[in-house]
């Protein structure tokens, strides 16, 4: 597995996941409203969340965003795509840190690292089209909507349409 290097923004450090991050992420991932767009129910316990976060069979990488005081602000991931040079990204911001620019700053740093630092040629992201904040974030970061899959997934809100967004290494980076 490719290592998870530490990345820096002006306000946040993105570092590898640690066991004690489970407690900080739990309130958000246990909240029904915050888990609306997940393909699984909200977590019922920290133990259940830890099992998911540290699943040895998952092939992705996790970065935890923390501020200068060491408070966890969110989780950012990169999962290898089917082709070499492609990865899918994802993110969740802790509910008490939303509307602070965490998603924009940290996702931009991750995007730059994956393309410039690791030499990936393309990044993708899948998003429920009703998840307007996430759609807006991807578009502000320069991602282009490449596909729409109607009634593609079942999330906590039910059957949903999923848009696939892509960013090429040759596109302007955030």
Image (spheres, grey):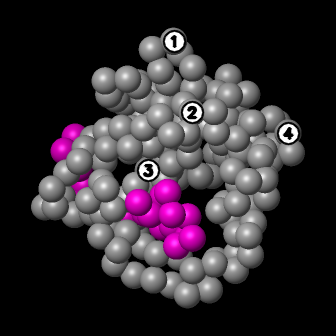
Q: Let me know if residue 40 is in the magenta part.
A: no
Disc 2: which residue: 97
- Which numbered circle lies on residue 79? none
Query: Which residue appears at 38% of the width and 44% of the height?
Result: 104
Query: Horizontal and vertical percent for residue 5?
Result: 37, 30
Query: Which mark's residue is nearer the viewer, 1 or 4?
Result: 1
Q: Report whether 20 appears left or right of 89.
A: right
- In the displayed structure, 148 sits above or below 102; it is below
User: Between marks 2 and 4, how big is the CA–CA gap?
Assistant: 21 Å
Query: Which residue appears at 48% of the width and 67% of the height?
Result: 126
Query: Which residue appears at 63% of the width and 52% of the height?
Result: 57
Q: Let me know if residue 131 is in the magenta part.
A: yes
User: Between marks 1 and 2, how big is the CA–CA gap?
Assistant: 13 Å
**In the rendered structure, which disc, 4 or 3, sits on the residue that comes first in sequence?**
4
Query: Which mark's residue is nearer the viewer, 3 or 1?
Result: 1
Disc 3: which residue: 78
What span is in magenta?
Answer: 114-136
Q: Which of 129 and 60 is in front in this view?
A: 129
User: Between marks 4 and 3, how big is the CA–CA gap?
Assistant: 25 Å
Provide the secondary structure element on which disc 2 rests.
Answer: helix
Mark 2 in CB contact with mark 4 (< 8 angstroms): no
Q: Report whether 21 appears left or right of 117.
A: right
Q: Report whether 42 appears left or right of 128.
A: right
Disc 4: which residue: 45
* Number of residues whose C-alpha sits closer than 10 Å to that of mark 1, classed few (under 14), some (14–19) or many (20 or more): few
């Amino acid at each position: 597995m490719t290592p998870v290097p530490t990345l820096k923004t002006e306000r946040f450090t993105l570092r590898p996941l640690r066991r004690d991050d489970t407690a900080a992420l739990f309130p958000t991932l246990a909240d029904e409203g915050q888990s609306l767009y997940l393909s699984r129910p909200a977590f019922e316990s920290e133990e259940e969340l830890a099992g998911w976060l540290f699943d040895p069979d998952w092939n992705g990488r996790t970065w935890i965003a923390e501020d200068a005081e060491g408070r966890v602000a969110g989780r950012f991931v990169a999962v290898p795509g089917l082709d070499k040079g492609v990865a899918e990204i994802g993110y969740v911001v802790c509910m008490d840190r939303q509307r602070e620019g965490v998603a924009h700053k940290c996702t931009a740093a991750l995007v730059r690292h994956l393309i410039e630092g690791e030499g990936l040629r393309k990044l993708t992201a899948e998003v429920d089209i009703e998840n307007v904040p996430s759609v807006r974030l991807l578009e502000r970061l320069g991602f282009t909507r490449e596909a729409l899959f109607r009634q593609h997934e079942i999330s906590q809100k039910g059957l949903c349409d999923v848009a696939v967004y892509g960013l090429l290494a040759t596109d302007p980076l955030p």
